[in-house]
Image (cartoon, rainbow, N blue to C red):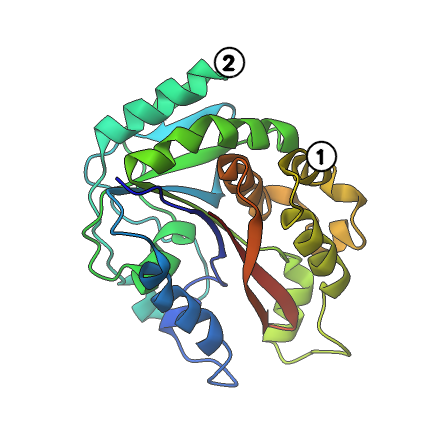
């Protein structure tokens, strides 16, 4: 079985890929990136493990639902966006393996047998894997938002990559909602937002020494404009999990897109 990479992808804004925008091309580059993602993989994944910025629990919690539904956890969008479907099956055997790896690294775990996929999962993956025929398990963030713990938990997951599992973190490298909503309402001002932090983050993620990469990511708040880009870090920490799972593989920036007045980037390890 060929080793799978680990990906961090920005998941867009709400159901952005399935509605009209002004300009109509706003999300075209991002959509094309997601559509092309399966073709960049060494082989079809056996399963997907997804860490979304939209699920937080007191301890790392693993989805054990064999047939997850969808959580339409976005508000105020067109009615048809609440009729979207993405029916990927769960994988309880993978869920148990994830629990064992995380517990083996000294972290407390829990399981959730009822939770469906939130929009940080089904919106981007409906574009990337529209057939929804690859078993998928979601893993929560830990609510204390400890960057070092998320890196370490990601390192514990690294063996999955050699077991045919594609690890995907979904969030946003820029998630200042005040700025994004102002842009959405037509109030863009000046240059694109988040450029300084995006440049710093790109340098940190692509460092050749994984220990240096992890040190910088653990201290991400020191980056220029860090708290402007991520007033709260829940959309950034899926990147930390993916970087941990990246191990010794050097990170590569795979997308830098300007949407809703801000910079959003994607990264791959392996």
Tell me if label 2 and label 1 are in contact, CB under 8 Å: no
Mark 2, secondary structure of its residue:
loop
Quarter of the image that includes the N terminus: top left
Task: Tell which residue pokes out farthest to the bottom in this image.
Answer: 23
> Residue at horizontal 26%, vertical 63%?
83
Is residue 174 visible in this depiction of the protein?
yes
> Picture quarter containing residue 132?
bottom left
Q: Is 69 on the left-hand or right-hand side of 53?
A: left
> Residue at horizontal 69%, vertical 59%?
198
The local crowd at label 2, few if under 14, some if 14 to 19, many if 20 or more residues have their Cα within 10 Å, is: few
What is the CA distance from the residue labelled 2 to the residue labelled 1? 20 Å
Identify the residue under disc 1. 215
In the displayed structure, would residue 38 be above or below residue 151? below
Identify the residue under disc 2. 106
Give percent across and percent down for residue 50: 39, 43
Give percent across and percent down for residue 236: 60, 47
Name the N-terminal-most of marks 2 and 1.
2
Is residue 57 visible in this depiction of the protein?
no
Q: Is 40 on the left-hand or right-hand side of 217?
A: left
In the displayed structure, would residue 99 be above or below residue 249? above
Give percent across and percent down for residue 188: 70, 78
> Residue at horizontal 23%, vertical 38%?
90
For the image, the number of numbered tags is 2
Mark 1, secondary structure of its residue:
helix
> Picture quarter containing residue 215?
top right
In the displayed structure, would residue 255 be above or below residue 225? below
Q: Is 188 on the left-hand or right-hand side of 44?
A: right
* Closer to viewer: mark 2 or mark 1: 1
């Amino acid at each position: 079985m060929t080793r799978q990479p680990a990906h961090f992808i920005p998941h867009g804004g709400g159901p952005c890929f399935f509605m009209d925008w002004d300009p109509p091309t706003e999300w075209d580059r991002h959509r094309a990136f997601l559509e092309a993602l399966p073709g960049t993989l060494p082989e079809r994944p056996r399963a997907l493990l997804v860490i979304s910025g939209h699920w937080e629990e007191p301890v790392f919690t693993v989805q054990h639902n064999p047939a997850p539904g969808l959580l339409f956890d976005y508000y105020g969008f067109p009615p048809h966006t609440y009729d979207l479907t993405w029916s990927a099956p769960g994988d309880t055997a993978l869920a148990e393996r994830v629990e064992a790896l995380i517990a083996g690294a000294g972290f407390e775990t829990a399981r959730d047998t009822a939770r469906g996929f939130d929009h940080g999962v089904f919106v981007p993956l409906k574009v990337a894997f529209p057939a929804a025929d690859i078993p998928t398990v979601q893993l929560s963030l830990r609510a204390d938002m400890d960057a070092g713990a998320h890196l370490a938990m990601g390192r514990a997951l690294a063996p999955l990559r050699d077991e045919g599992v594609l690890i995907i973190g979904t969030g946003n490298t820029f998630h200042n909602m005040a700025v994004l909503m102002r842009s959405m309402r037509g109030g863009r001002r000046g240059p694109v937002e988040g450029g300084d932090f995006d440049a710093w983050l790109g340098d940190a993620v692509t460092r050749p020494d994984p220990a240096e990469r992890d040190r910088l990511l653990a201290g991400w708040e020191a980056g220029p404009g860090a708290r402007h880009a991520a007033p709260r870090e829940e959309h950034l920490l899926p990147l930390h999990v993916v970087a941990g799972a990246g191990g010794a593989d050097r990170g590569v920036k795979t997308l830098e897109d300007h949407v809703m007045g801000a910079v959003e980037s994607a990264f791959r390890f392996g």
